[in-house]
Image: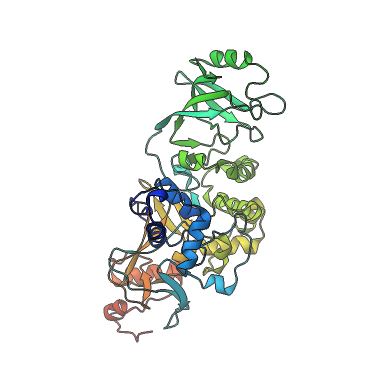
Amino acid sequence: AGGDRGGVLRKAGPLFHPSEMSDAQVAALVLKAKEENPDMGAKRLVTLLKEQGTSVSLNAVKKILQDAGGGAGEEPAAGTAGTAPTPQEALASIGKVERRNANQGCGSGIFAKVGVKAGEKLFSVRPAISVVFDPAAQRVCGLCLSASAAPTRRGPARVLLRRAADASFGFVFDVENDKVVVTGVDVSSPNYATLLAGDSITSVEVSGVQKKCSSPLDLLTVLKGLSPSAGAQGDDSLVLLVDRQELSPCRTCKTFAICSSCASHGRLPWHAAECAAFSALPEGTRTGDTSITRFLLRYKATLANGDWTDEKENMSLVPTLQANPVALPQLEKLAKVAGLDQDTVANLIFQIRTNAMQIDRAGKAACALSVWVGYTNHSCDPNAQVVPDREGLVHMTALRSITPNEEVRFSYVDSTAPFEQRQQILKEHYGFECRCDRCVKEDPNKAASR
């Protein structure tokens, strides 16, 4: 289910200021945005419309959605990852599909609520949990999974510099490639997450006057010459001008990077817990392939601290996914390293093996566990496909027209492979024999259909 297709969620229609529009036009704009982005709640819709240049209040959006019969569209509260789902929540609907019992001994499946044309998206989600593989950890955002092909920079950015209670600024800098570069920021510093490791400092602006920094000595001279009040809490007279990397690697754990978009949304502090947990492991545990260890630590950090965004699948639904058992000779060691019980670790690994999809970024870069993709059954003659985009969203897209109440299925394997090869992979990896119409026709033994 891999892929590296471009594109993001479509944005809403024409851009007008509400004062230039009638109530009916505003309502039409909100409803169009909701139709094109069905998984967004009212708060996210307000943000989306604002990004497009249209300011509509949260209460107005809620009222429009309620009047249209769709409810207020509330986002789940942050920090609810540990809340167990009810059966009703686990059998919810999303986008243009709903989950309900399937026929032919396939348990539950995903069914179209409305007619869908070829090429249309049935649903779009940000997966419940993901991990970037070690070789790509410095070039792919560890949160949204966006990638940077080269260490490009965006700048200049203005960073308001603050003093801590002890009057320090809480960051370290050095010379890299003839530039003054931030090499670390203390997690307790008031500048943590606003100033990033890798930022190249070009100048300091004090009370509107810029002072260039071509060497660490220049910066030290400027900072030491400041008045005690400069950069104090509540004072905005001290600004750093920096060239910022499109992707900033974590220089502590060295297995994480954050993109400029996630950093600008204040998401870097969320990484602190998993970073500290990984960095505290014995050195031997932090070498080689660490992806499964980091996946487990991320799961634990999410349970303890909530998720890094509420615009993704709630991780509390992960336990509802199917988990096909396999031998785990390292189970005891993994559980000890992650600080989780063995049953939890085993079930997570089983679920990864059964449901995870590969995310490509100029090659294999990450794996992601999506609840709604996991809920979707297999067919060797699929009517849909899974398309991860460059921004980390996963889209279930129709390959042909799908009628209302028709089950949505995609292929877990390469559907162009021969019958015997498909059956072998499905049996060994997913634990079942496919008896879809195509397989029944291609079966040389003409076995009875399921």
Residue at figure coordinates x 36%, y 65% from the top left? 413
Judge left or right: residue 282 versus residue 26: right
- Looking at the image, which is closer to me, 428 or 77? 77
Rendered position, 58 above or below 114: above
The percent position of residue 308, horizontal first and vertical second, equals 56, 49
Residue 226 placement (x, y as % from top left):
62, 16
> Residue 414: x percent and y percent?
32, 64
Identify the residue shown where x is 56% and y is 41%.
Answer: 268
**For this rendering, which residue is in front, 236 or 200?**
236
Q: Position of residue 185 (x, y in %)?
A: 60, 31
Can residue 182 be seen here? The reply is: yes
Q: How is the image coloured?
A: rainbow
Q: Which sits in the foreground, 278 or 50? A: 50
For the image, the number of numbered tags is 0
Q: At x 66% / y 29%, what residue is drawn? A: 233
Quadrant position of the C terminus in the picture = bottom left
Q: Quadrant of the N terminus?
A: bottom left
Residue 365 visible in the displayed image: no
Q: Is residue 41 left or right of residue 165?
A: left
